[in-house]
Image (cartoon, rainbow, N blue to C red):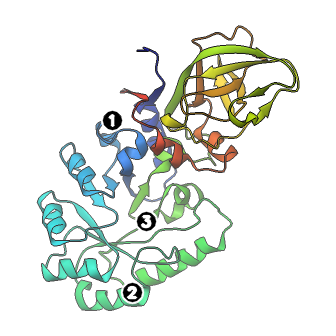
Amino acid sequence: MTAINSELIIDSNLLRKNISYIKSRLQNESKFMAVIKSDAYGHNLESVTKSIDDLVEGYGVVRINEAIKIRNLSKKKVLLMQGIYSQEEFITAKKFNLDVVVHNHDQFKIFEENNYFKNLWFKVNTGMNRLGFEIDDFIDIYNEHLFDKKFVLMTHLAASNDKESISNHEQFKAFEDLTKKMHENVEKSIANTGCIMNFPDKSYDWVRCGIGIYGGYFKNKEILTAMTLRSPIVNLRQIKPGQEVGYDGRAKATEKMLIASVYLGYADGLPLAIEDGTKVMINNKIAEVFGRVSMDLTTIDVSHIKDCAVGDWCEFFSPELPISEIAKSNKLISYYFMTGIKSRVKKIFLST
């Protein structure tokens, strides 16, 4: 059995630096909710919670089992961002003092029947057209049930990464017009990472920040990738012009080349469709994928890297090679890589 392994190294110090930088962008006295759903975007939920608890006012997740894990580690707010769907989940949410998003009439009925209106966030649809009450429907609910209740009003931007998109301004206007019809104790939340970066004046009472914490936001170089995915070179091979590399002969040499086989493949979470030319880093130098990814190996052109040797690490993303690079060059998103690394990759969490 081989002792070598691929590694996913997570640096909690970078998570903290990213949060501190993002918070410095806020123009209001906003509370910071760290979105740590899907096992903290693959960064390990428990470890991330312990590392950032002093920097945040709350956490956002989707699954109730993740919310309970956080509650056992932190006294901060824990928000179920897609709400609950049964009486049993209501009882659990109440028991663990969880905040809950309500985004449709079926969910609201659960709270109405229990005459329970604490720790609620009401989501309205201002243009994303996924979850959330239509504005007129919510006004009816507000006038009948919520006019004297404290709650958080929230919505979700569809194009916050695109500062020029007209949809942002349409959503801001719809949201702000609605808030004017609410009483003064209603808190407001609209900002995700993109909104904080592009529209910091819209941070309101709560920001809900996810991808920026982990360094997957590609439009700001101050935000650093907190993960390093790396694997060792296990073989080096000289090939001649005209020789093909890998399955289906997708890559063909036009000159003499040195090809490194790296111990990472699609069984580890690297997409099968990774394209030739995708940049990686070996010995602090850029190299490129050459040939189709297989289950256990990826082949890399290292012809120009002097002293390249078996055992050298190949980084697919890291603080020095942002995860956004491999995502953009393969028409994917950084979330995909963060949450897709498989269990056979050794995970190492560097704590502060």
Label 2 sits on a secondary structure element that is: loop
| Residue depicted at x 35% and y 43% | 55
CA gap between label 1 and label 2 equals: 39 Å
- Dot 3 or dot 1: first in sequence order is 1
Q: Residues within 10 Å of mark 1 (few under 14, many from 20)?
A: some
The residue lying toward the viewer, choosing from 319 and 220, is: 319
Q: Which residue is mark 2?
A: 181
Labels 1 and 2: the sequence-earlier one: 1
- Return the x and y of residue 133 as percentages of the image width and height: 39, 81
Q: Which residue is rendered at x = 25% and y = 55% of the image?
A: 77
Residue 149 coordinates in the image, percent (x, y): 22, 79
Dot 2 or dot 3, earlier in sequence: 2
Residue 51 — which label? 1
As drawn, 9 above or below 169? above
- What amino acid does circle 3 point to? Tyr
Residue 204's disc number? 3
Quadrant housing the C terminus:
top left
Is residue 333 or residue 174 the one in the foreground? 333
